[in-house]
Amino acid sequence: MPKELESYTTIMELDSFGEPEIRKLVNDFIKKQEIQKPKDDLIDKLVTRLKGLSQTEIENILSLSISEDGQLNYSDLPRVLAQKQQMIKKSGILEMIQVKETMDDIGGLENLKEWLKRKENIFKQLKLAKDFGVDIPKGVLIAGMPGCGKSLTAKAIATAFEMPLLRLDMGRLMGKYVGESESNMRRAIKLTEASSPCVLWIDELEKAFAGVNSGGSSGGSEVTLRLFGNFLTWMQEKNSLAFVVATANKIDMLPPELLRKGRFDEIFYVDLPNKTERKKIFEIHIKKRRAVDFDDINISTLVDKTDGYCGADLEGVVRDAVELAFTSNKGKLTTEDIMQAIKETHSISEVMDIKKSKESYEKLKLKSASKK
């Protein structure tokens, strides 16, 4: 804006359409096209899923939906998600992840699952919950050992909540011009709010805000500090239906301001799987690949031999054993095949110094994701 014109100018920012405006657009479209009005439940779902789209995009989706059968029905809901995917792709900042993982794919972490079940019930009965005085869930920080199901849980949450999963890559926010990174962060937040209800997944949060604790002594740290400030403010003040799932491997690298109450609803610590959890993980991965052989496999023996293995290690063991059984032309998967794969696998406890990480988590007294 030229300086000479600033005093004559008023800046007006156009917000995304709210639910009342979208509902009016949908109802006006139905009347104009003279089609049968769908059930209120379908209109409610359409309105919720159309949030974040422009008037032109909404009208295009509705027109495309009635072009095949002349009416609006539940089969048209995936079109809205596809259009939102286009919007996310064009931004170049966020990424929409296709998910098929469910809570049944997670072995153990029962405390975390029970907590998420409560949040799921709130989202699925949002109006009743708000009328009762329940706050809209903000998000969860899942910290702990690598390969123990943090990313898998983020995907399963999106499936359970019946929301699209958006992934924020902090590397994409960084721009080469002054102020570009902060602008990208504001744009990412605005896009997330416009796309709500959604699950926003921020993977390896400690890497995203590396340098914040240094106090901004370098140019890069100053930018990170400002990004961190924008993110903190949003987490504190947000009241949209965007549920943030952040994962971290080294929580001691995160700024203490991020860990206090009011940012995330809860912080969970994910440890290496215990015996019960290892048994469940073996069951999930064997049944997924060779369900027909499961009853003949001695799971207890496998569990006893895999102390110190993370979930990713156990999946790798089963995958290698199935491959070995196939290439050996045995025709079935046996306990011996899996034992051989265990012998050839170096667990995360062997390749990483996890003692220091465990001490950090115990010191912070975080809530355990697993039942003892």
Image (cartoon, helix red, strand yellow):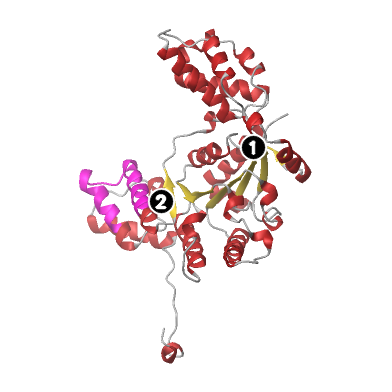
**72 falls in the magenta region:** yes
Q: Residues within 10 Å of mark 1 (few under 14, many from 20)?
A: many
Disc 1, SS: loop
* Nearer-the-camera pick, 93 or 116: 93
Which amino acid, mark 2? Arg
* Nearer-the-camera pick, 302 or 137: 302
Location of residue 349 (image quadrant): top right
What residue sits right under mark 1 in the picture? 145
Q: Which residues are magenta?
A: 59-86
What residue sits right under mark 2 in the picture? 49
Q: Residue at x 66, y 45 (%)?
A: 250
**366 falls in the magenta region:** no
Label 1 or label 2, whichever comes before in sequence order:
2
Q: Quadrant of the C terminus?
A: top right
Residue 228 horizontal side relative to residue 368, left or right: left
Q: Residue at x 65, y 35 (%)?
A: 352
> x, y (%) of residue 317?
54, 22
Look at the image and tell me whether residue 137 can be seen. no
> x, y (%) of residue 79?
32, 47
Callouts 1 and 2 close, C-beta under 8 Å: no
Disc 2, SS: helix
Q: Main secondary structure of the magenta part?
A: helix
Q: Quadrant of the N terminus?
A: bottom left
Q: Residues within 10 Å of mark 2 (few under 14, many from 20)?
A: many
> x, y (%) of residue 61?
29, 53
How much space separates mark 1 and mark 2, taking CA atoms? 35 Å
Which amino acid, mark 1? Met
Camera-near label (1 vs 2) is 1
* Nearer-the-camera pick, 100 or 204: 204
Q: Is residue 371 above or below residue 295?
A: below
Q: Is residue 116 above or below residue 93?
A: above
